[in-house]
Image: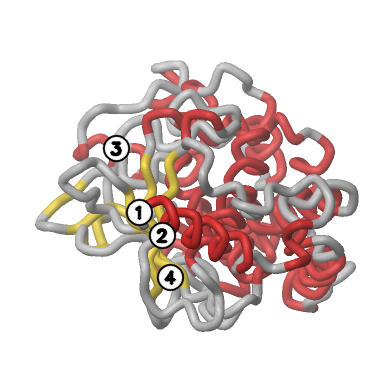
Amino acid sequence: MRLLHLAAMVLGAHLAVPTMAMEGKFNHRDPLGLAKKREARDLPLNIEVAPGDWGKASTQDIQVFLDAVAREFLAAVDSPRAGELTIRVVPRAGSPKVLYEQRSDGEYVIQLTARDERWYQYAYQFAHELCHVFTNFDHKAQSAERVAEHNQWFEESLCETASLFVLQQLAVKWASSAPTKNWLGYDQALAGYARRLLSERHRYLAADQSFPAWFAARQASLQSNPYAREDNELVATTLLPLFEAHPEYWQAIKYLNPDKASAGKPFADYLHDWLAASPDKRLPREILALFGLAGEASPTVAERGGKASTTQETAGAQPSARVAGGPAGPRGDR
């Protein structure tokens, strides 16, 4: 009887497999590849999708999709930190966010507002929050339970650039190699979403306006309100061609916020700290030039050769964001 019962269970398992999953080269017993051990995957990063209100999307599909997004971004970042990181992804209302506070087991928590099977939103939001993690977003001076965000606007703009870059890269790759059969042909939706975002008028300056002039006029506003999304998106669209021409530039973001004091410094000093810390100087130099700040480091930074100060007093930190929570992600309706 026991053998008959076991045989019935096996037969039932086979009958439960959808016909479409049995076609082609996919494993009909594991069409999404979830049975493979995490060590066997080519992704050196642990991502765990928490159960919750994801709408019509299954946590299994979200897991596979976010793995693919992370794989594309990490291929450009080439980060030695990746193998150490575990990221727990949970649903939330409002805006996407990555929390400053790590869980007791060392996990980072990323909260997404994407729902159902709008996969382009998952890609857009997750790439943004993953970018924060690799820019050392939590390595900033703190005072009275607040964290300095004097230059948070730049990090937000850079992570918006990451979202656009990953959408475009996924679209190109998936045109010939989707991660599973579920996403065959989805490259068109990813490419279309990127085009839609990049067609927004507020992302571009008037023909007679230079970017350094725009920045000089907007700098104070950016510092006081780092989450002014239309300004962030204009900066991101301006930065995007640098990464399209040189995808390896993403490796430099691992050296942003090199010292806890950097986040509260004048923007030119902040960039010079980044320049000093990054082994490859090309991206920081191009960004300094783009903003018209190539020769704008303060005397103390210049005397140190760009080395970051280690004290909050030298940094002139302007703490504003509470430690609880973390940087808000892209607009929640995206």
Q: Secondary structure at mark 3?
A: loop
At label 4, counting other C-alpha atoms closer than 10 Å, the crowd grade (few under 14, some 14-19, many 20 or more) is some
Amino acid identity at mark 2: His
Amino acid identity at mark 4: Asn
- Pointer 3: what residue? 261
Which circle, 4 or 2, is nearer the viewer? 2
Residue contact at pointers 2 and 1, CB within 8 angstroms: yes
Residue 11 visible? The answer is yes
Which circle, 2 or 3, is nearer the viewer? 2
- Pointer 4: what residue? 225
Amino acid identity at mark 3: Ala
Alpha-carbon distance for marks 2 and 1? Answer: 5 Å
Residue 25 placed where, x, y %?
80, 45
Position of the N terminus by quadrant = bottom left
Residue drawn at x 38%, y 37% is 85
- Pointer 1: what residue? 2
At label 1, counting other C-alpha atoms closer than 10 Å, the crowd grade (few under 14, some 14-19, many 20 or more) is few
Alpha-carbon distance for marks 2 and 3? Answer: 66 Å
Which circle, 3 or 1, is nearer the viewer? 1
